Image: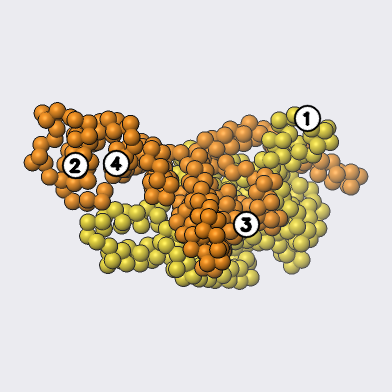
Chain colours: A yellow, B orange
Amino acid sequence: MSSTLLAPARILAIGRNTFTEIVRQKVFYFLLIFGLIVIGNSAFLAKFSFQEEFQMLKDVSLGAMSVFLSLLAILATAMLLPRDLEDRTIFTILSKPVPRYEYLLGKLLGVVILLTLSTLIMGALFLMVLFFREQSALAETQRTCPPQELAPALAEIRKAAFSWDLLPAMAILLVKGILLSSLTLLVSTFATSGIFAILVSASAYFIGHLQVTAREYWMSGIGIHWWTRIFTAFVALLFPDLQAFNLSDDIVAGTSLPMGLFWQTVALGAVYTSVYYAVACFLFENREL
Amino acid sequence: MSGLSSLFRSLLAILMIAVMGALLLPWQATLQREAQAAHFRSIPLNLSLREQIGQSGFLAALSGFRAPLAAFLWIDAHSAWEKTEWGRMAGLFNTVTTLQPHTLLYWDIAAWHMAWNASIAALHDTKQQSEVLRERARRQYIDLGRDFLERGIRNNPDNYLLHERLGILLRDKVEDHNAAADAFAKAAACSDAPAYIGRFSAYEMAKVPGREREAYDRLMALYRQGKKQQLPSLLARIRELENKLNIPADQRIPATVVGGSSPSR
């Protein structure tokens, strides 16, 4: 057994292996669907004004990114432990001097690599389409606009197309994906099957979006029955506040994201991810395999 | 024994998550307040929205897909426009703007469709024989457009665009120059407002009986800003008001001053 608490090389090896395993299942085919949504959407929106086109391209692309990342995080993670148990690879790994927490961390790392790569590819594709549509709108305006009104018209197009706030918006979608992956990993440490882990995690996803409502209701404490109070407390304390990560809806509306808010949201995601991972280790440590 | 130990560990795990949840509560509340102060997470997901968008739409909005849902409904509204279904368009615009109240574009175009396209269509509606009713429908659509802009302004008070659009609507559709002047003045007061909006406010004010002096002072203030504001339309208005207000000759702008280009603004 290694004398250090964490062996980065071992974790990296498990992470790389996990990533390869997921890739072999052809998960990246979803990128084709994403590409079709973004490019198809863009072609379809050509009949709208350029402001409407950019607005909807951003709305739909970031929405699709959010869906794909959340699905990928839950589905890819939920199948990891059951498959390793089924293939018996888990016994091969754990019979070596690999602590269980390193095994779990390696698994999580594999999914994080997958999510990061997916975000980068989807983000690049989205920004590329946005850039081409912007260039096409600029060229058209240059051809048709009277010279004295050209400069403000071009500025208007540039303002409507790209905004630097789109980058943190995508980063937060990734943070949410990693959080969901960690949560699913926790569920799969006590789940009896992959399907069970998917169902529980998907339910947690929906309940997590209602956590803020339950929290406000519970904390206001005005005129609610004791059983409602217990129920809302249960939701507020046990589920993550996933609405905190839904900033892209407002970013695409043109709301500027303060950096303080961005970093705090990232930090909140990191805390959730760490705690879920820690609890997963705690449960997995004594699980009979 | 093993079962008991497993149960104990599960309870302990739940307790650990609950403790984390409790520790995070103040941070979550602070973060939410900060987000709302920066115009994030300020959409009330309540029963009224649920009635507008249906169960599946509400579920999508709850799950963080407000923006794509609004985009799809906007496309639907565009299809309704192609079929000139004005009533359906108004309903869809209502839902879209409720889902994305900080997207200025939605308020702006919704108001334009109602106050310009739908109102003209209502006025020329061949199915309606009564001219009185056609005129009433026209005014109702203009009011609907105005309502969109006023609600948009309540949600985005610091941006000039909707104030300006309201000024244009009040000027061209309602012909209430007093209210238009105030709307343009509010637009001009916004930090991102283009220079011409200040002139628009003064031009409208000049048309309001009793506000000529105020309009003259504003126009002169703009005139003193230099060449970029000294356009033919501004000079023409100042000269009109100089005559109307009997401004002494030595205080009038020199006859030699001739404005630059862009007469419409």
Secondary structure state at the residue bearing disc 3: helix
Q: Residues within 10 Å of mark 4 (few under 14, many from 20)?
A: many
Q: Which mark is residue B235?
A: 2
Whether tag 4 and tag 2 are in contact, CB under 8 A, the answer is: no
Q: Is residue B209 left or right of residue A18?
A: left
Q: Amino acid at mark 4?
A: Tyr
Judge whether residue B12 can be spotted in this image: no
Residue located farthest toward the left when viewing the structure as drawn: B256
Q: Nearer the viewer, mark 1 or mark 2?
A: 2
Q: Write down the residue under mark 4.
A: B203
In space, the residues marked 4 and 1 are separated at their CA atoms by 56 Å
Distance Cα–Cα, label 1 vs label 3: 36 Å
Q: Are marks 1 and 2 on the same chain?
A: no
Q: Image quarter for residue B209?
A: top left
Label 4 or label 1, whichever lies nearer to me, is: 4
Residue at 28% over, 66% down:
A144
